[in-house]
Image (cartoon, grey):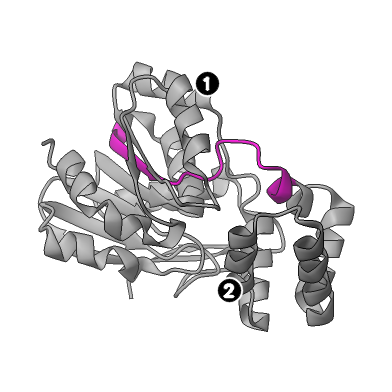
Amino acid sequence: MPEVPHHKGSLFYQKTGSGNNVVLWFHGFGQQHQVFDKIVNTWQVNGTHYSFDLFFHGKSNWVSDIPTTHQDLQTIFQQFLTDNNINRFSIVAFSIGCRFAFSLTKAFPDKIQNLILLAPDGIQFRFWYWLATYPAVSRKIFKRIVSQPAWWHRLLSILEFTHIVDKKLLRFAQRQMDGQQKREQVYNTWVNFRHLKTNTKTLTQLMHTHRFSITLIAGSRDKLVPARLVKKLKNYIADAPLHVFDTHHNDLIEASQETIFKVLNNQ
């Protein structure tokens, strides 16, 4: 089983293909590494592909109570790159998987060729995410909501009654947290990944200094990471092309297959 061991956990990955062009793939919340298989197999993207399971997903695990840090990921991926003799690589990341992509970009900017970000999370301030994961009191409440379903259903009723949250986003949240295991996955992922973030200034400086490309992809019907937020990123990262598809959040990977293929193959 290919995985990168670490004293706080282990990171599982699947390797497919062969060739000097290396691509690292990072999925979104609630998914696993296989979500990218269709792109790699159908479009025959040339090169060697490494598709990862994020921590708390698939076969990867994180056993520490301490949140994952950039240093943790730098250590893990330095070992991964050494083990696989990788000198240069591209990254394709979706949603919360972009947090891993940002860590790698900070740690190994001279090794990046293409950075393809689909509905990127971890680069802009999002009030609800901050409220749930940063203040210690809020995290305790978040934990209580996760561990006691009655609290979760009561919160949904309040949000629906007050119209604080968009109805479609509320339905999405209901689907993502409709079972105890899913609720725990949300809590563990959100809380443990909260330090994995960047900002447009840092990202732009790295791109210009190390001369790698950034491609932004968004869905016009995405309520979780709205296209308008991704368009704001475009204003700060002027050299990054933006592709907007008429699709929802969870359909964005499939909708953008051809675009991803063309970027990776320099078309």
Total marks in image = 2
Boundaries of the magenta span: 111-130
Q: Bin the neighbour count of mark 1 within 10 Å (Cα to Cα): few under 14, some 14-19, many 20 and up.
A: few
**For the residues bearing labels 1 and 2, Cβ distance under 8 angstroms:** no
Q: Residue at x 75, y 64 (%)?
A: 160
- Look at the numbered disc 2 and give the secondary structure of its residue: helix
Tell whether 200 sits left or right of 27.
right
- Could you tell me which residue is drawn at 34 percent across and 27 percent down? 240
Amino acid beneath label 2: Arg
Question: Of tags 1 and 2, which is closer to the observer?
Answer: 2
Q: Secondary structure at mark 1?
A: helix
For residue 120: magenta?
A: yes
Q: Is residue 75 visible?
A: no
Label 1 sits on what residue type?
Lys
In the image, what residue occupies the spot 76% across and 52% down? 164
Q: Which residue is mark 1?
A: 201
Which image quarter holds the C terminus?
top left
Q: Position of residue 179 (x, y in %)?
A: 64, 82
- Identify which residue, 132 or 158, lies in the foreground: 158
Label 2, on which residue?
175
Q: Which quarter of the picture shows residue 165? A: bottom right
Question: Quick check: can you spot residue 131?
Answer: yes
For the point 63% across and 81% down, the residue is 181
**What is the crowding at mark 2: few (fewer than 14 residues within 10 Å), some, or many (at least 20)?**
few
Q: Quadrant of the N terminus?
A: bottom left
For marks 1 and 2, the one nearer the N-term is: 2
Estimate the spatial distance between the alpha carbons at disc 1 and disc 2, rounded to whole Å.
Answer: 35 Å
Residue furthest right as drawn: 137
Q: Is residue 1 left or right of residue 153?
A: left
Picture coordinates of residue 244, whole percent (x, y)? 35, 41
Residue 254 drawn above or below residue 227: below
